[in-house]
Amino acid sequence: MQNETKRKLTIGVLYFTIALFALYIFVMFILNGVEWAPLVKGKMENPDFSLATWKWFFYPHILFGTVALAIGPFQLTKISQRKPKLHRMLGKIYAIAIFINILVVPYIALSATGGRSSTIAFLVLNAFWLWTTSMGVIKATQRKISAHKAWILRSYAITWVFVTFRLVVIPFSLFLDSSVAFPFAVYLSIAMNLLFVEWKRKKSKQHPSGPKISTSKPVM
C-alpha cells in the first residue's frame, strides 16, 4: 500500500511538473510569439538566421517533446500495465514522437545559444535519445520485456532533459558565458537524469513491488 501511494505521488508530481512546463512553453513561445522570446531574439541578431525556417523545426520539437513527456508517466500506471494494447499503442506514439524530434533537433542545434559548444552538446543529447529509444524499441520487438523497460526508462530520462535543462541552465547562466553554461547544463542534465533512473532501478530490484506486465507480445 505504501509503495502504491509513493507511485501515485510520483506520477502526480511528474504530471504537475509537465503541466507547468507545458504552460511555460505555451506562454513563452505561442501566446507571446516565438520571436519575442529572449533566446530567440539573440538568434535573430545573426544575419544568417532564418526565423521562418527555424519555426518549421522548432514547433514540432516542442509539440512532440511534450507528447513524449506526457505519455511517460501514464505508462507507469496500473491502467496502462493492465491493458497491453493501450500500453503498446502509447509506446508506439512515444517512440514516433521521439524519432520525429531526433530528425528536427540537428537543425535547431546549429543555431543553439552558446555557439559551437552548445551545438555539439545538443547533438550529443540527440545521440543519447536515439540510442536509448532505439534500444527500447528493439528490445520490445524481441519480446525482452525486462530489457525493454530498462531502456525505455533511460529514454524517458533523456526526454526529461527537455525540462531539466531549462531548470539547470538558469543558475549557471547568471555567472557563466552561454558558451559554457548551455553545454554544461546539457551534459549535467543527461548525467543527473540517467543516474537517477539507474539508482531507482537498483532500488526497485532490492525492494520489488507492483504488478509486472505478463504478456508474450511486444509492448511497443
Image (tube, rainbow, N blue to C red):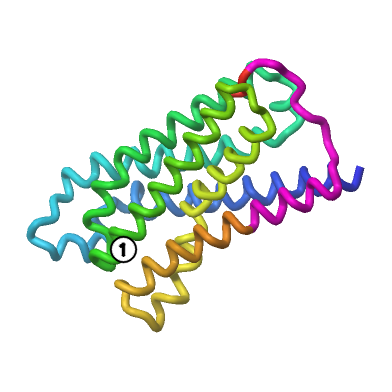
Residue stretch rendered in magenta on the structure: 196-217
Q: Which residue is mark 1?
A: 118
How many marks are shown on the rendered structure? 1
Seen from the viewer's position, the closer of residues 111 and 146 is: 146
User: Badge 1: how crowded within 10 Å, few (<14), some, or many (20+)?
Assistant: many
| x and y, in percent, of residue 192 in the image | 57, 62
Q: Report whether residue 83 is seen.
A: yes
Looking at the rendered image, the quarter that the C terminus falls into is: top right
Looking at the rendered image, the quarter that the N terminus falls into is: top right
Horizontally, residue 100 falls left or right of residue 210, namely left
Picture quarter containing residue 211?
A: top right
Picture quarter containing residue 11?
A: top right
| x and y, in percent, of residue 184 in the image | 42, 69
| x and y, in percent, of residue 150 in the image | 64, 40
Seen from the viewer's position, the closer of residues 119 and 82 is: 119
Horizontally, residue 15 falls left or right of residue 2, namely left
Seen from the viewer's position, the closer of residues 31 and 67 is: 67
Residue positioned 46% across, 54% down in the render:
24
Q: Report whether residue 38 is seen.
A: no
| x and y, in percent, of residue 188 in the image | 49, 66
